[in-house]
Amino acid sequence: MSLISYLTTIRFEFGAIGGIQQDLTELGIGKPLIIADEGVAKAGLVGKITAVIGSGADLPVFTGTPTNPTEEAVEAALALYRERNCDGLIAVGGGSPIDLAKGVALLATHEGPLEKYAAILGGIPRITAAVAPVIAVPTTAGTGSEVGRASLITLKDGRKLGFISPHLIPKRAVCDPELTLGLPGWLTAATGMDAITHCVETYLSPRDNPPAEAIALDGLKRAVDNIEKAVADGSDRDARYQMMMAALEGGLTFQKGLGAVHALSHPLGGQKDLSLHHGTLNAVILPATLRFNQSDAEAKYAVIRSTLGLGPDADLADYFAQLSGRLGLPKNLGDMGVPASLVPAIARAAVEDHSHATNARPATVEDYERMLNEAIAG
Ligand SMILES: [Zn+2]
């Protein structure tokens, strides 16, 4: 059976944030809580949002989002949401503030603890339409969380779990490439590689969903054609537009399921002491998984080569490793500070991750250990 579903209403243009007041009115939100992080606030992006909202100056703002959202941060933001009698959320930032906002929107209307809603623990049917409305305003081009149904949150016990439901999809995605013009080069590169990984992994996922595959290939082409331009010149408006569209498309294809890269990067991202960036992890892990998956996805590899304008003998793993290198991203997980001693635990967590089931080639704990060791040594 194919399950194909596109639900999100999206504003996409330079200046799109000008429509946020209208979105609030249409969604019946009178008092939104703004969720951001310190970097987004320092860059002046929260101020740009409050400036277009009638009551903007009085709105509560939570800027305590960690690099990888945590249950503790959800609870802290939820306390502010309740204290200020909020009735909806505006998430401003990369994937972390958007995922955090989804967690707050869930617990604002569903009894805790958070754990019981985790997909891997049977939580999907427990999430109802009562989830508070979220307007997602991405300020990076990578995560796709603005149109995704998943939120990744690290619980107090250290497990980074996926919370997945169509009810968690933001009611509006406001994609304004203007907000990405000041994004630093390394973050443009790392988040852009996340978008590329989403397109590659969802395309390779064995689920039957041709519309999602077409979107993934279009997103992949836009991203590879523009990521180096956007990193080299952050003020290149066309490159910024194309990267934001590629990220959006990567998010729209999530419904097909991701794969081994995310099955590994989720538990690695849950290592609080290492505080590893999601997109950077994916860029570094992607080549090892592409080598592993190749035998089970030859026909799709040929389509990707042709989409990228590569010859029939081109090695996709090498291609993406070289692209990451040109973007200045780390060469391997060892350079990111991931010790080999973590390999057994991360490999065991990978087979428990919700992205594992849709990898292009079935993988065992031992397979994940091999991929990890390859990614650590690079
Ligand atoms: Zn991702």
Image: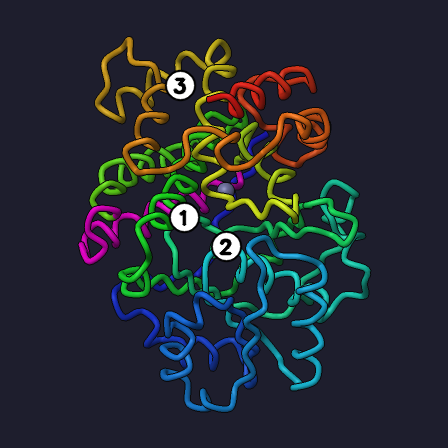
Q: Which residue is mark 3?
A: 300
Marked residue nearer the N-terminal end (2 or 1): 2
The residue closer to the viewer here, 372 or 126, is 372
**Dot 3: within a 10 Å radius of its alpha carbon, few (fewer than 14), some, or many (20 or more) residues?**
some
State the residue at coordinates (64%, 28%): 357
Return the x and y of residue 138 as percentages of the image width and height. Answer: 42, 60
In which quarter of the view is residue 119 placed? top right
Q: Amino acid at mark 1?
A: Gly
Return the x and y of residue 347 as percentages of the image width and height. Answer: 68, 26
As for residue 262 lying within the magenta part, the answer is no
Residue 294 higher or lower than 236, as above or below: above
Return the x and y of residue 219 as percentages of the image width and height. Answer: 33, 40
**Dot 2: within a 10 Å radius of its alpha carbon, few (fewer than 14), some, or many (20 or more) residues?**
many
Q: Return the mark for residue 94.
A: none
Q: Amino acid at mark 2?
A: Gly
Q: How many marks?
A: 3
As for residue 243 lying within the magenta part, the answer is yes
User: CA separation, marks 3 and 2?
Assistant: 28 Å
Does mark 3 have its CB less than 8 Å from ligand 1? Answer: no
Q: Which residue is mark 2?
A: 95
Does mark 2 have its CB less than 8 Å from ligand 1? Answer: yes
Return the x and y of residue 24 as percentages of the image width and height. Answer: 48, 78
Q: Secondary structure at mark 3?
A: helix
Q: Amino acid at mark 3?
A: Lys
Q: Which residue is mark 1?
A: 142
Cβ atoms at labels 2 and 1 below 8 Å apart: yes
State the residue at coordinates (54%, 57%): 96
- The magenta segment is 231-255
Cβ atoms at labels 3 and 1 below 8 Å apart: no
